Amino acid sequence: MLYGRNDEQARISSLLDAARDHRRSGALVLRGEAGIGKSALLAEAADRVPRVLRVTGIEAESGIAFAGLNQLLWPVRDRLDAVPPPQAAALRSALGETPPGHDRFTTGLAVLTLLAELAEAEAPVLCMVDDAQWIDTATTDALLFAARRLAAEGVVMLFAARDDAFSATGLPELRLGRLPRADAERLLRARGLAPTVRTRVIMEAAGNPLALHEFAAARDRPHDGSRPLPVADRVLGAFQAQITRLPENTRLMLLIAAAEGRGYMPSLLAAASTFGVGLADLEEAERARLVEVTGRSITFRHPLIRSATYQGAVAARRVAVHRALAESADDLDCRARHRASAALAPDEDVAAELQAAADRARDRSGYGTAAALYRQAAELTPDPEARAARLGAAASVILQAGRLDEAEDLAVQAEKLGPAPPDLARLGRVHAVIEYERGDPRAASRMMVDNAAGDERAAMLRTGAMYGWTSGELPAVLRAAELLPDDPAVRGLALLAGGGHADGSPLLATLVREARDGAGDRLRAAQLALVIGDDDAALELAAAEAAHCRRHGRVGELPNVLQVQAQTQIAAGRHADAEATVAEAIALARDTGRPHREGRLGAVLARIPAIEGDEARLRELIAHAPPPQGGLADSALALLDLGLGRNDDALRRLEEIARGPRRHSTGAMVSAADQVEAAVRAGDADTARAAFTRFRAWADAVKQPWALAVALHCEALMSDEEEPYVKAIRLHERSSRPFERARTELLYGEFLRRNRRRADARVPLRSAASVFERLRATPWLDRARAELRATGESGASVPTAPDVVDRLTPQELQVVRLAASGTSSREIAAQLFLSPRTVEYHLYKAYPKLGISSRRELSRLTLEPV
């Protein structure tokens, strides 16, 4: 029976009931000091559920990638074929059945799918993680990824961890407090303790349940009147007192078990034989309920007993035990760990073994584990240069895990040791990526270019050039081109940065064309397509790369791809799609340890509220954007001002963009066309001509129909002549940017109305109003309607059918569109990194909003493909 835990039990019960009765999933982290009752709550929950998967963190296995996942999934390993092949391959790799080489987050998706499959047959499924602070980081990443994406499977995940020793951002937490005196009295009364003894035990235990039990068991122990110690230390002392009273051989066997850590009997007994002790010597410890021996394993009743055993032994005995365990180990990683624990001074042989273990963890995508092993190897490395190389390796892999502060600290430590030139270059790359992730791509571009050397030189220069281009650090772009003159992408960006649009654009266009034909890096080509305004190519390449990442479970790469995809969707007027795409990218960025990207991704959407005239939402989106995103933010604010008729404000912002470091970017070029309109309306002909000259040169170079059409409407604005409008509208028929077309039609309609051609004006004005209404471009729609009224058209509202996608949440929209295309729930789940049950839940929620009741009826709706 549990005392004083009614609220905690009720919280867990509500999760289990919701999973059983309503198929709702949930996760909860239980936190508290050692002995506070976390494990007891987990055990009580497990008694209520038929299907339980459990894993207990073992400190000795915290350095073995996916050790926890092996423990958790061993009972259901025969069910791996129930998940999609890429996910099954990732799980088999994690479980050591197949070679490594999978995206680490695919493993988390596979865990989610497997749990959902189990729950489909026997909900609820309870997944329990005890002593989570000691679970290896590869397993932790996979389990937290799955926990954050639970929805409608009938799965409950419970984590128990020490205070502040396990990061589970995004999951609800429940902190366990000490037992009130009344509950402590009830517990001890049930143990049959006399009132005077109860008073002393309650005072010493301070409400810690484990301490209450252990101090009650030692009721004849004299009161310790010395300086008060933390409860955990007093419990530790109680356990050490018990251990001290045991026979010497029993204490030695307990030490071997504590040092071995995993409870793996073959290794433990092999080491024990070198000291002349064996399993029989554990008998007294079993009688004292310090350990339990079951089958091929030995477990301590509580982790503090293991700590008491290990800490109570003298150092020489601990070293001897670790050496014996290293000799008897049948696993290379365990051998390396024990040799490291036995090392009393730097030792290159031991360091090399640890590095090999780190390499194995890295190859299995266990980046956090690999970093810890590289760091430990560095500590045991005698040579400073070699130590720097291992610290640099630790920095690189921990960066892949998204832990920026740790990566920076390791890189700084390595640099102080005087690393070799190739290692110094890698450390420079680490610093550059950290700066980029933190929101300073200008500094990142300089670092990447300045440190480019060795095997990664060309890749670093390409990355540095792209960082520099997007952030406006143009000297870094030019420097990269000097150092890598034969690379068409870097040279093309440098030419554009210097204003050489006619020479630079064809170089980039060739790379885009090659990627569309199946050669080259699709993501890089999609980014270059954005640079030259090729919307169709950017959308095609980004969609293909996103599909590839989804198909192969490459979750970690997807946020970058989705950012490009969202930008192209906004340009194409697919605002709901862009909202859904960015929402998914932000969720994945959080799940993959890159929360710093949220501000950058949010800024991508800034153009939508700018078009809609929603100033409050626009400012909310750009509030958390890092300063280098000022190009997107300022362009959006200027467009908002222009739409609201604040021409002077718009012109001021646009002039700042034209003088700023990102003046040669695609966004700045689009803003140059806005600058023409703002200058014309403000009566500033010189500014209008200068902006037009810049935009026209770029449009002529990139040769995109939408850009040429916008250049013509700018020309028409300045000349107040009809022919450029007519040509522009013809070009817009081949254009993919509806907002730009509607703006041209609005300007043309205004021109015709001013020239008393009212009947002619109504045609482009109606078309413009229809597009503005669909895009919810309220300021622009108001202008179009006002012009229609001025032509004499009564009731100048242009009604359109409400867009069904506006009724759905971003995730419902993604699910519905895929379902409408005939994609099965299982396939949708694999693509969107959800469980099939959650897909069905989203469809169930979406059908009433769409006025339908089944998949069959989806085909009747107008839903463009994602």
Image (spheres, helix red, strand yellow):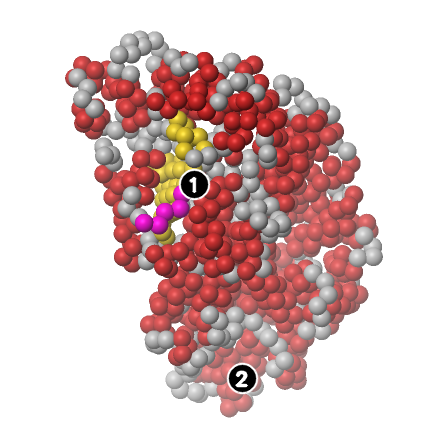
Is there any visible trace of residue 676 in the rendered image?
A: no
Residue type marked 1:
Val
Indicate the amino acid at tag 2: Pro
Image coords of residue 835 (percent x, y):
43, 59
Q: Position of residue 745 (x, y in %)?
A: 56, 80
Left or right, 861 with respect to 479, comes to left
103 vs 25, left or right, is: right
| Front residue of this view, candidates 289 and 847 | 289
Q: Nearer the viewer, residue 634 or 794?
A: 634
Of circles 2 and 1, the one toward us is: 1
- Height in image: 737 above or below 172? below
Q: Mark 2 and mark 1: span between their CA atoms? A: 67 Å
Q: Position of residue 498 (x, y in %)?
A: 77, 58
Task: Kindly state the secondary structure of the residue where label 1 is placed.
Answer: strand
Which residue is identified by label 1? Answer: 55
The residue furthest bottom is 759
Q: Which of 700 and 421 is in front in this view?
A: 421
In percent of width and height, residue 474 lies at: 72, 52
Query: Is residue 228 among the parts visible in the rendering?
Result: yes
Q: On the rendered structure, is 785 left or right of 625? A: left
| Residue 764 circle label | 2
Q: In this view, does 204 lie above or below 387?
A: above
- Magenta segment: does it hold 52? yes
Range drawn in magenta = 50-54
User: Between 651 and 308, which is closer to the camera in this rendering?
Assistant: 308
Earlier-in-chain disc, 2 versus 1:
1
Residue at the spot x=64%, y=74% of the render? Answer: 706
Label at residue 723: none
